[in-house]
Amino acid sequence: MAHWTQIAGALKEISAGSVANVWGVNAANNIFRYTGNDNSPWIEIPGALIDVTAAADGTVWGVNAANNIFRYNNGGWTQIGGALKEISAGSVTNVWGVNAANNIFRYTGNDNSPWIEIPGALIDVAAAADGTVWGVNAANNIFRYHNGGWTQIGGALKEISAGSVTNVWGVNAANNIFRYTGDDNNPWIEIPGALIDVTAAADGTVWGVNAAGNIFRYSS
């Protein structure tokens, strides 16, 4: 039976790129990486971030309280030009973010000119390893990016995460949890539980955190 297993620790935001690449930040903006051992699950990583994102290929990016942007490499953080309040990395090449004005940006692959603005306005964007991109706006409308434009999908979410074209999860304003069905005509199935942040990986991994900062991993 599908269920949530609580994992020790306390985080306000979490990101899973794969079963092994799971990162999060706590209420003090400290950064943690999953060890793979539920008995001693977290190792602290130097730095301070308000949002961290982990990809299937090991890519990790984050943004701090000043909206500075960083990429993790060889045990340290490299600042990348620009300013974002939220960031999502599906892979080394598929990195998206939104700024304080809810403008949307995609990484160019060139650190000297790193961001290209994408038309639209979102409060949260989610980039997957296979190129899939979803987002939600300030009205909690849901959108999927395709062929250079946004298609609205029924429902209402305040936060969304895409691990792949099929593994898409989100939470709504009431902290209810939803998983994408694959059918745009009936797109969401509610999953029991209550989370403020959920993260879905390409390999099917799903983690989340609740309003108390408790950490959960989903088992299907």
Image (cartoon, helix red, strand yellow):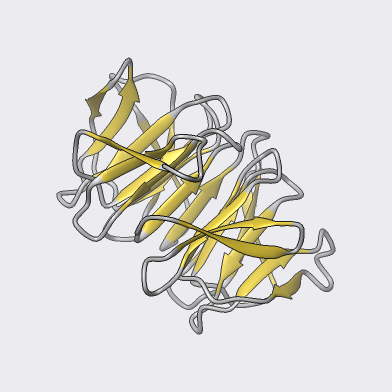
- Does 194 sit left or right of 77 as displayed? left
Q: Is residue 118 visible?
A: yes
Please state which of residues 17 and 104 is positioned toward the viewer in this rendering: 104
| Quadrant of the image occupied by residue 14 | bottom right
Q: Is residue 52 visible?
A: no
- Does 127 sit left or right of 115 as displayed? right
Percent across and percent down for residue 134 are: 37, 35
**The residue positioned farthest toward the bottom in the image shown:** 28
| Quadrant of the image occupied by residue 202 | top right
Please state which of residues 214 and 12 is positioned toward the viewer in this rendering: 12
Percent across and percent down for residue 205 are: 65, 43
Residue drawn at x 46%, y 27% is 132
Quarter of the rendering occupied by the C terminus: top right
Residue drawn at x 62%, y 43% is 55
Please state which of residues 184 and 189 is positioned toward the viewer in this rendering: 184
Q: How many marks?
A: 0
